[in-house]
Amino acid sequence: MNEGKDASPSADDADAELRHTGVPYHTQWGSPDWVGPIVDDGADPCDDPTWQRSGFTDPERYRFWADRLCGLTCFESALDYWGIAHPSRAVLLDDALRHDVYKMRDDGGVDGLIYRPFAGWVGAAFGVRVDVLTEVSIEEIAARLDRDTLAIVSVSPEIRYPERPNERRGGHLVLLHGRDRKGVWFHNPSGVAPHQADAWLPFDTFARFYARRGMTLTRT
């Protein structure tokens, strides 16, 4: 792992390469190989024999929530990288719901992951400091990565196929774990290889999908 200087971005930091290697990759579903069939072909997530891996036992609850847990999946990767003990994703979800990180809507949909309740919850529960950032460029948020800091940022789920034109920004979360002078490395929990685990994109390509908001996660 290359080490950065500190959490405050500077011109030198933005130009320096920093990459956290060995960050575990988790997909929102049971197996990385099943992401393509689920998101592109409408396959039943429960046809994946590993669908219970994240702690869900009720198929309907799993089908509903797995599609919505990109943020918790990114956070789980960060916790595992830092060796911070945590329960299964299904139990993390229960705790997140108690802390208003996700809110059910009257129409049956979900609002979330809501940044500030998330920040308060994970700070108290796991000792991870979360700084919420809005209206920041991808270069700025990448410059904040250091030896103890990763970032979760909002992008369009269309980033799984970056060579295609996109119609929107935001609506999905990915985990940033490295940068160089030209771009960023990231895990996409609903990504399809080769833009799934340890993916790299140049800043200008990433910015097409990026909603100019996110959070830094710092191990304290």
Image: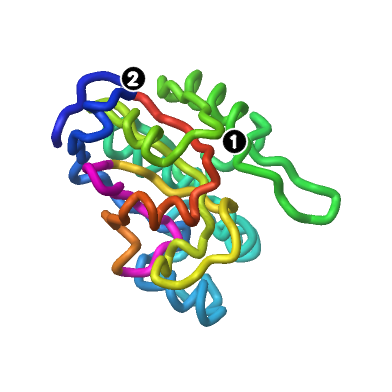
Q: Quadrant of residue 167?
A: bottom right
Residue 51 appearing in the image: yes
State the residue lying farthest toward the left.
Answer: 2
Q: Position of residue 133 (x, y in %)?
A: 51, 29
Horizontal side of residue 180 vs 144, given as left or right: left
Give the tally of numbered discs.
2
Rendered-image quadrant of the C terminus = top left
SS of the residue at dot 2?
loop
Q: Residues within 10 Å of mark 2 (few under 14, many from 20)?
A: few
In the picture of the structure, the residue carrying the numbered disc 2 is 8
Q: Quadrant of residue 200?
A: bottom left
170 in magenta? no
Q: 125 and 146: which one is in front? A: 146
188 in magenta? yes
Region rendered in magenta:
178-193
State the residue lying farthest toward the right.
Answer: 106
Real-space CA distance between mark 1 and mark 2, rounded to the nearest whole angstrom: 29 Å
Amino acid identity at mark 2: Ser
Residue 70 appearing in the image: no
